[in-house]
Image: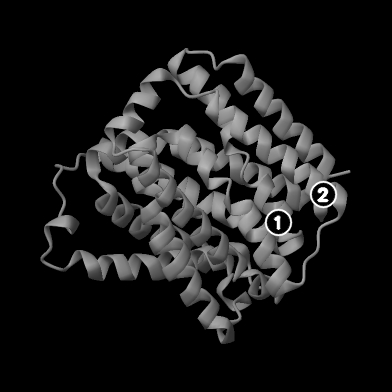
């Protein structure tokens, strides 16, 4: 069971790395709100169909509905809007670095509210992995990304957005752990989270506000480029990480689910042809070493 939980968290990291790369350019064209609305509506519909076909609705413990409400509002709405705005301003590498801050947040909350404790070896492994993630991003960033950061409003705004996103994601995932332990299928939990958020965003989109109105003409290709990373993130990666949360310590699952900066290095290399700097690869190696220490 532990092997499957670890594999699920690592696969979630890979999914988010791919999703960040795929989302960056269409997000620039569509805008944060419209991007969020399209992703939530389409991903929610797909997940609901899958849960209906697979018969997962009967596994849901509906008496735990307050946990779903908190997860939807805090994680999917607040966290996702902050995440996308951070991604728009900073790009995928720096965003993934700052989102790794959710690991210590989850560790503290898991200890305080769920009574989860980490061994000394596991804490050392988490520290090594986080240090490696920082190196992978800080020394993997290009001069163009640094200039883009300066143009987008500065580092302070990016850090604040990332902290909001990291804390919101951590809380939104952690609050569902008791529900998952009661037998709710992770895919069904994802479907409820996404569908609830889609309903809220759709209502907001009906308001006569310029900030929520689409400003870009949508083509079928652009729509596909918006929907695909959304389903990878909301549908596949979140479900995999929720499975890991259900069957492993939340803090460890969180750090294993935060390795997307490591995966994104070779993906960006293949995409742009620019090889990351040696220290970035060193950071990736440290992240893998930290993961190995955790699993000892």
Horizontal side of 74 relative to 8 (left or right) equals left
Q: Nearer the viewer, residue 227 or 154?
A: 154
Measured Cα–Cα span from mark 2 to mark 1: 9 Å
How many C-alpha atoms fall within 10 Å of the one at disc 1: few (<14), some, or many (≥20)? many
Q: Residue at x 34, y 59 (%)?
A: 41
Q: Pointer 2: residues within 10 angstroms few (<14), some, or many (20+)? A: many
Residue drawn 26% across the image and 66% down it: 202
Give the left or right position of residue 34, taking residue 95 as reference: left
Q: Please indicate, yes or no, whether residue 183 appears anywhere in the rendered image.
A: no
Pick out the residue farthest to the right: 296
Q: Are marks 2 and 1 in contact (CB under 8 Å)?
A: yes
Residue 276 seen: yes
Please state the horizontal and vertical placement of residue 83, each as a whole percent of the image: 41, 50
Secondary structure under the numbered disc 2 in the rendered image:
helix
Work out whether residue 58 or residue 250 is closer to the camera in this orientation and state it.
Answer: 250
Q: Quadrant of residue 148?
A: top left
Residue assigned mark 1:
251
Residue 86 lies left or right of residue 138; in this view the side is: left
Tell me where residue 78 appears, x and y as whole percent: 39, 62
Q: Position of residue 250 (x, y in %)?
A: 70, 60
Secondary structure under tag 1 reads helix
Which residue is depicted at the point 29% across and 49% down?
A: 32
Residue 293 is drawn in which quadrant? top right
Residue marked by disc 2: 122
């Amino acid at each position: 069971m532990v092997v499957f939980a670890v594999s699920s968290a690592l696969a979630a990291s890979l999914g988010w790395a791919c999703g960040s790369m795929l989302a960056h350019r269409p997000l620039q064209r569509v805008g944060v709100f419209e991007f969020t609305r399209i992703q939530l509506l389409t991903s929610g519909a797909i997940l609901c169909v899958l849960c209906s076909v697979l018969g997962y609705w009967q596994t849901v413990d509906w008496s735990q509905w307050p946990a779903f409400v908190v997860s939807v509002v805090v994680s999917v709405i607040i966290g996702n809007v902050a995440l996308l705005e951070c991604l728009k301003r900073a790009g995928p590498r720096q965003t993934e670095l700052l989102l790794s801050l959710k690991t210590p947040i989850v560790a503290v909350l898991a200890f305080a509210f769920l009574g989860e404790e980490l061994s000394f070896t596991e804490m050392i492994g988490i520290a090594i992995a986080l240090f490696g993630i920082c190196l992978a991003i800080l020394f993997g960033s290009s001069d163009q990304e640094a200039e883009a950061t300066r143009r987008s409003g500065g580092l302070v705004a990016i850090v604040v957005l990332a902290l909001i996103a990291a804390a919101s994601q951590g809380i939104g995932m952690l609050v569902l752990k008791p529900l998952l332990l009661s037998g709710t299928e992770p895919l069904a939990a994802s479907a409820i989270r996404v569908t609830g958020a889609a309903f809220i965003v759709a209502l907001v989109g009906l308001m006569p506000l310029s900030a929520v109105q689409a400003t870009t003409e949508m083509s079928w290709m652009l729509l596909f480029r918006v929907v695909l990373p959304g389903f990878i993130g909301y549908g596949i990666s979140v479900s995999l990480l929720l499975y890991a949360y259900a069957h492993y310590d939340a803090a460890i699952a969180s750090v294993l689910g935060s390795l997307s900066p490591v995966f994104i290095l070779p993906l960006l290399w293949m995409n742009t042809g620019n090889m990351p700097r040696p220290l970035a690869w060193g950071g990736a190696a440290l992240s893998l070493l930290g993961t190995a220490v955790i699993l000892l």
